[in-house]
Image (cartoon, rainbow, N blue to C red):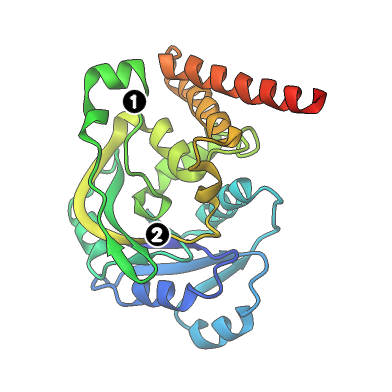
Amino acid sequence: MKATILITGENKEKYLYKTINSCLNQNYKNYEIILLFSNISNIEILKKKFHKKIRFKKIFKKKNPVKDQLNKISEGIKIAKGKFIFLLDGDDLFKKDKIKKILRNRDKNKIYLDNHILLENNKFTYRARNKLKDNFIYRYLINPWPDKVCTSCISGEKRLFEEFFKKVSINKYNYLAIDILIVIFYLNKIIRFEDILTVKKVLNVSVDKKFSNIYKKIYWERRIEQHKFLKEVQSKNYSLEFFFSKLISYFFDFQKYIQKIF
């Protein structure tokens, strides 16, 4: 089976060489690589070095970085020749046996979420999944979406990605990236692959950094969007966490209002 790796390369100039080489070093050979970009400063150097090995697709850039990534992947799916899709951020890495292991165990009706290790300041760190999130009560009262999710760990049949982009508007939500949208949309079709097949780099400039601080309103706004999307696609009632997130968001608004007065 032919596979396609879609690399989103915006603002990842410093890391793309290693990212691309981690794909070229795969021990599975029937695949293609497509680099999706709008404006990469070293694009001509990359084209010269890899023009015979990967395809380049320039795509109009959206101002919102989350929507920009979604748009790039959507356009990449349209031109992908592979029947199986692997997503990859331009600063992350694939282990050399990733494609082979996933395809060996593939289920045509499932989305795969493989395990990953973190790389920050040249140090590897493994964060285990929070087993509490597998608990029925937690999933009912808090949220049911999987723990330890990243874009570069997501793969699946091309037709599943086509179905996703056909039914989900990439302009509707401001804070939800492709990883959380996919896992919520296919909540009952996710297969976890426990082997560590991906290296995720942790950078200060990562978009995720904006959403990881619970003391910022944007963190709670994204949680609210996640719950709204869950209700939209899975017809699930709002959990306690949704109302708690709304309350915290109102608190930030009230705090801002008080600051203006005084």
Residue 1 visible: no
- In the visual, does 250 lie left or right of 53? right
Q: Residues within 10 Å of mark 1 (few under 14, many from 20)?
A: many
The picture places residue 22, in percent across and down from the top left corner, at: 35, 73
- The relative height of residue 114 versus residue 224 in the rendered view (above or below) is below
Q: Which mark is residue 144?
A: 1
Q: Which residue is mark 2?
A: 82
> Which three-letter amino acid code belongs to the residue tagged 1?
Pro
How many other residues sit within 10 Å of disc 2, few (<14), some (14-19) or many (≥20)? some
Residue at 81% x, 23% y is 261
Amino acid type assigned to the residue bearing label 2 in the image: Gly
Q: CA distance from mark 1 to mark 2?
A: 31 Å
User: Is 54 situated left or right of 132 in this image?
Assistant: right
Query: Helix, strand or loop at disc 1?
Result: loop
- For this view, does 229 lie left or right of residue 202? right
Which residue is more in the foreground, 22 or 99?
A: 22
Tell which of 143 and 236 is nearer to you. 143
* Residue 75 horizontal side relative to residue 95, left or right: right
> Percent position (x, y) of residue 69?
57, 52
Image position of 244 with respect to 186: above or below: above
Measured as percent of width and height from the top left, residue 246 is found at 56, 19
The C terminus lies in which quarter of the figure? top right
Q: Residue at x 75, y 28 (%)?
A: 259
